[in-house]
Amino acid sequence: MSALILALVAGAVVGLALGALGGGGSVLAVPALIYLLGFTPAAATTAGLLIVTATSLTALYAHARTGNVRWKAGTLFAAAGLLPAAAAGAAAVRLPQPVLTAAFAAVAALAAVTMLRPGRPAAGSEADGVRPARAAGTGAALGALTGLLGVGGGFLAVPALVTVLAFEMQAAVGTSLLVISANSLASLTTRGATTVGIDWAVTGPFTGAAILGAWDGKRLATKVTGGLLRRAFAVALLAVAAFMLADALT
């Protein structure tokens, strides 16, 4: 199968995940770029951020039109993570790749397990308003992980918004796209040198397919329950985490 076809198929899957689940873009894009399309890890993480930024902005627009974005909480959450994302992104280039891969897998598994646990109300529901300190603290931690691992952060933002800030799943999906876009842009500012290794003939079609897939994902999200989306997201995260951990240890 040609690289172009692989890029189009992988891009469509990434876009579908982002549109429907509000995350999972980079956690799927980075392995696809490395294992299917032959990118180096450094080039894959940078290309993944470029792809996810463009796709997240498209999906954010679609979710905003249906009122699924909580702008106040999302802006605070995202703003708190900008500096940590940039700082961690600069530090990430100095760490061994197996360490980053293992950390990526461990954090993905933790997020999946958190989402599979029975729901417990956080201290202050969405209807009561989000506590600024809680949102800022969670956003800062997420930003640091985003910069360190080279991901948009949606696969962590959605569980955080659901379990820590008590958002309903649909609102968590829409709001996470705002967080992903901001954190990805902040992380990209520290990765200019790694754009040299990006194959734009592959990255371009990958991005285009992901953008189109995001619209289909948004339509899918309106047809299934939040609980089903949450479980599907968690299972996908566990599968990716297991694969990447095995790769890091071999």
Image (tube, grey):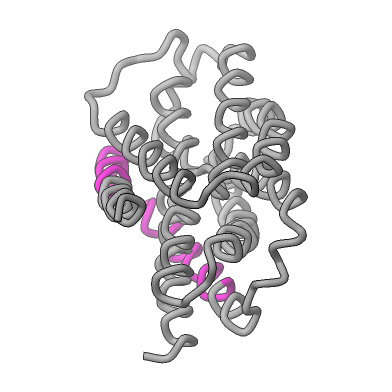
Q: How many marks?
A: 0
The image quadrant of residue 74 is top right
Give the x, y percent position of residue 42.
59, 60
Q: Quadrant of the C terminus?
A: bottom left
Identify the residue shown where x is 57% and y is 58%. Answer: 45
Give the x, y percent position of residue 221.
38, 52
Q: Quadrant of the N terminus?
A: bottom left
Q: In terms of secondary structure, what is the magenta stretch mainly?
A: helix
Give the x, y percent position of residue 136.
63, 20
Q: Residue furthest top?
A: 123
Identify the residue shown where x is 56% and y is 32%. Answer: 142
Give the x, y percent position of residue 164.
44, 20
Does residue 17 lie above or below 183 as drawn? below
Identify the residue shown where x is 47% and y is 10%. Answer: 124
Q: Magenta stretch?
A: 207-236
Identify the residue shown where x is 49% and y is 17%. Answer: 127
Does residue 214 lie above or below 99 as drawn? below
Q: Based on the picture, tell me whether residue 186 belongs to the magenta stretch.
A: no
Does residue 37 lie above or below 15 as drawn? below
**Residue 73 visible in the shown view:** yes
Q: Is residue 46 left or right of residue 13?
A: right
**Residue 66 visible in the shown view:** no
